[in-house]
Image (cartoon, rainbow, N blue to C red):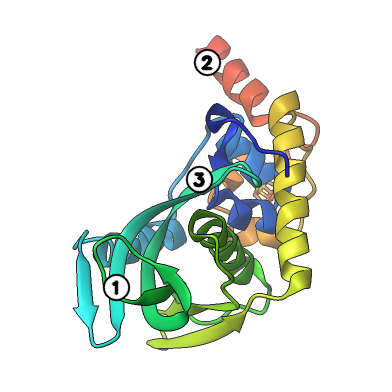
Amino acid sequence: MSAYKEEEYLMLSGIQHFAFCKRQWALIQIENVWQENYHTAIGNILHERVHDSTNFEKRGNIIISRGMPIFSASLGIRGECDVVEFVKDSGGVKIHGRDGKYVPYPVEYKKGSPKKNEVDILQLAAQVMCLEEMFLTNIPYGYLYYGQTRHREKIEITKEIREKVSAMFCEMHMLFKRGHTPKVNPSKSCNSCSLVNLCLPVLCKNKSAKDYIENMLNEE
Ligand code: SF4
């Protein structure tokens, strides 16, 4: 199994942007452009609330960890889990300072309700793959919790979704290495894109956002 160096690690959460629009991911990760809109602001508030208490909590046979840092050398990614529930299970792994064995299940918090696309599932699958590599165990599923429905869904992490996650991070690493930002490809995603004003999908068809901003600064 090949492994990335730590300095090559990409942000795990970038998979949501990449699945939404490859150009959006590149603007954020390669060109360091970010703009907050209503959707990202609400999402950040929800995440801050989840990460508020950065401790371990025990509830019966479950140990709950909030804001846990995670990584995968084989995928070349790092990130953080909103919540990891370590459920006591004889088929699990030993955890330092605790009796018995546990299987870690990630719980990812999202604003709104379940989406029609698989963006949230891809992110959850990446978290599962990191935890599997860190704890040398198998994790067949994780959970997505939605703020609007106040309900969590159990999501099976299939072989197909794992392959998709691996392929997407592989492509992200290739783009990142080349410093390549894909050209504008207007779609209905642009209507809810937090970078629409910087990307300018209609006016700026063949330019990178970096070029656009540089031109703006030169004109001042
Ligand atoms: S405005 Fe459209 S093309 Fe540009 S980054 Fe957003 S979704 Fe992608």
> Which percent across, then down, holds residue 190?
66, 56
Residue 70 in view in this figure = yes
Residue beneath the point at 68% across and 74% down: 117
Residue pointed to by mark 1? 64
Residue type at numbered disc 3: Arg
Residue that appears at 36% across and 68% down: 83
Rounded to the nearest whole Å, what is the CA distance between mark 1 and mark 3? 20 Å
* Mark closer to the chain start, 2 or 1: 1
How far is mark 2 from mark 3, CA to CA? 34 Å
Q: Quick one: label 2 or label 3, which is nearer the N terminus?
A: 3
* Quarter of the figure that contains the N terminus: top right
Q: Amino acid at mark 1?
A: Ile
Q: Looking at numbered disc 2 in the image, what kind of residue is underneath it?
A: Leu
Label ID, residue 217: 2
Q: Position of residue 188 (x, y in %)?
A: 72, 63
The dot on residue 78 is 3
